[in-house]
Image (cartoon, rainbow, N blue to C red):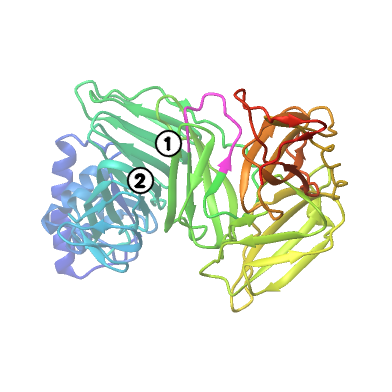
Amino acid sequence: MLPARPAFDLLVLAAATAAASVALAAGPQPMAADEPTYVHVLQPGDTLIGLGRRYLVEPGSWPELAHLNQVRQPRRMPIGSSLRIPLRLMRTEPGLAIVTSITGSVRGTDAPLIVGQTLPQGSELNTGSDSHATVRLVDGTLLRLRSSGRVRIDEARRVTGTDAVRSGVQLDRGRVEIDAQPARGGQPGFRITTPQGVLGVRGTQFRVEADGALTRGEVLEGTVAVSGTGAAGNKQRVAAGFGTVVDAAGRVAQPVALLPAPDTSQLPVLYERPLVRLRLPAQPGAVAYRVLVARDETFDAVLADVRSATPELRIAGLPDGRYPMRLRATDAQGLEGRDARALLQLKAQPEPPLPRTPTPRAVISGTRVDFAWTASSEAQRYRLQLARTISGGAEFAVLDRDLKDLQAVAQSLDPLPPGAYVWRLASVRADGDQGPFGDAQSFELRAPPPQPAPPSPPTVGDGSVHLSWQGLPGQTFELQVARDAVFTQIVTALTLDRNQIELPLTGAGRFHVRLRARDADGFVGPWSASQSFDVIPCVRDARDACVRAGNGTLQLQ
């Protein structure tokens, strides 16, 4: 029971009792169950008058507290009992939100925002393309505004003398992700308004997307009450794991189950290329996929936000590091499903140089291989690995060569045994930081084939010379005829698919001939030894044939 009061207060209390009795006689009407209230636990010395002075905008409206709480005996309010005070009657003072993270371009009402900036009621946030912002609202709720969005803080008030707050935002466009703080007792929870509806919560995790025609809500934890604000507006309670869509008329669709989290079990952990490719298995019911890459597990600072109509998601522009990811699928209504969490470890720098020679799948004759590559601006030296080709793709498990401190952009290896090889390169910075190896290149080293037999002795006729040589099935041949033995004065160069030819004579004198064979798989053998033949100048008749005398030809002197 309340302790005795001085005579003056007793007179006031008597008047209060009479006023309360009048109010009750007029017909007590309990508060609506969903009216936002502050619950005060009665302490020794509490009176309705005192509580009115402490909390109410109009202290003299304390009889309404008696009326709303159906207090019939104000002098006998039990200590420890609860008194519900409507927030609409209580004094409030301005509260502030604070910007905790910014990625990209984020503007306030009339200027760019910075981390740590406070935002009063009425402030706007606008995110540009590939930009994100996280704001801690007056009630502790974390609001993460994704790219190309606009939100306004339309309520940020603290109830004077209490821990109660009034917190809400208006989402005009874009997508927000909400971690709402739980509300105590009958206090109002966080509220978000869109052009199509109102979403009210009392502690939950959910996402909201708004555009000119629809509002989409996806609940991850807790429950969200969704009310349409249009002419056909209705209400739905959406539980965790479900989502709903509100149309332009305010119709709130029946909640549907969110798509399950994508399967990330086959994703690699380490990525070694600047362009990261995430390949997910196709998911039934999914029409698109999304990945968010953040600086840390809070996802306050999002570094990449990529959407794709296929299960392959490509991420570019990240520096080397370890990043948490959230991946989700989108259904035909545009509702995004549950999150899959995965870790992205990127080590793509310094980038490897580009191989120049040997060219991919080259066939080389001999025992020497000349390697060459481009110079990397980030590299002080290079590392080259050479290995035999092994079926199954584990070629570099056993190395033939591992050259770790190459200063130049070329290296020759000799001798190497014949076989199929793969090779790869990496760049190394001045501090010893080695980047990833580039893609492996293959080549085949073949033992030098025996030198092809030279052409048979030529048969020189009056107007042509006949050449023939040995060959294998499927081979083609390159033939050169020159005036000099080092083949700088080439007269004829032909590619033939047969092993003989009749060459027309192109003058008198000594000619040199050589050839080489090309196998069906493209392998080119060495040139044969040079051979020569002589064409003797002679006196020719009207048919351009040499004039003969006895057993010889009439030669020109």
Residue 233 in picture, x, y percent from top left: 25, 24
Which is nearer the N-term, disc 1 or disc 2? 2
Q: Residues within 10 Å of mark 2 (few under 14, many from 20)?
A: many
- The answer to whether residue 498 of the structure is visible from this angle is yes
Q: Residue at x 74, y 30 (%)?
A: 548
Q: Residue at x 14, y 57 (%)?
A: 57
Q: Separation of disc 1 and disc 2 at Cα? A: 11 Å
Q: Amino acid at mark 1?
A: Glu
Q: Amino acid at mark 2?
A: Val
Q: Is residue 388 magenta?
A: no
* Residue in front for this viewpoint, 232 or 102: 102
Query: Is 90 displayed left or right of 408 in the figure?
Result: left
Quadrant, the N terminus: bottom left
Q: Which residues are drawn in magenta?
A: 278-289
Write down the residue under mark 2: 176
Write down the residue under mark 1: 218
Q: Residues within 10 Å of mark 1 (few under 14, many from 20)?
A: many
Residue 494 in picture, x, y percent from top left: 65, 36
Residue 96 in picture, x, y percent from top left: 25, 63
Query: Is 58 displayed left or right of 428 in the figure?
Result: left
Q: Residue at x 51, y 41 (%)?
A: 313
Label 1: element kind: strand
Q: Is residue 281 magenta?
A: yes
- The answer to whether residue 71 of the structure is visible from this angle is no
Q: Residue 536 sits in which quadrant?
A: top right
Q: Residue at x 77, y 46 (%)?
A: 532
What kind of secondary structure does the magenta stretch mostly adopt? loop
* Residue in front for this viewpoint, 463 or 213: 463
Is 280 situated above or below 126? above
Label 2: element kind: strand
Q: Are marks 1 and 2 in contact (CB under 8 Å)?
A: no
Residue 310 in picture, x, y percent from top left: 50, 32
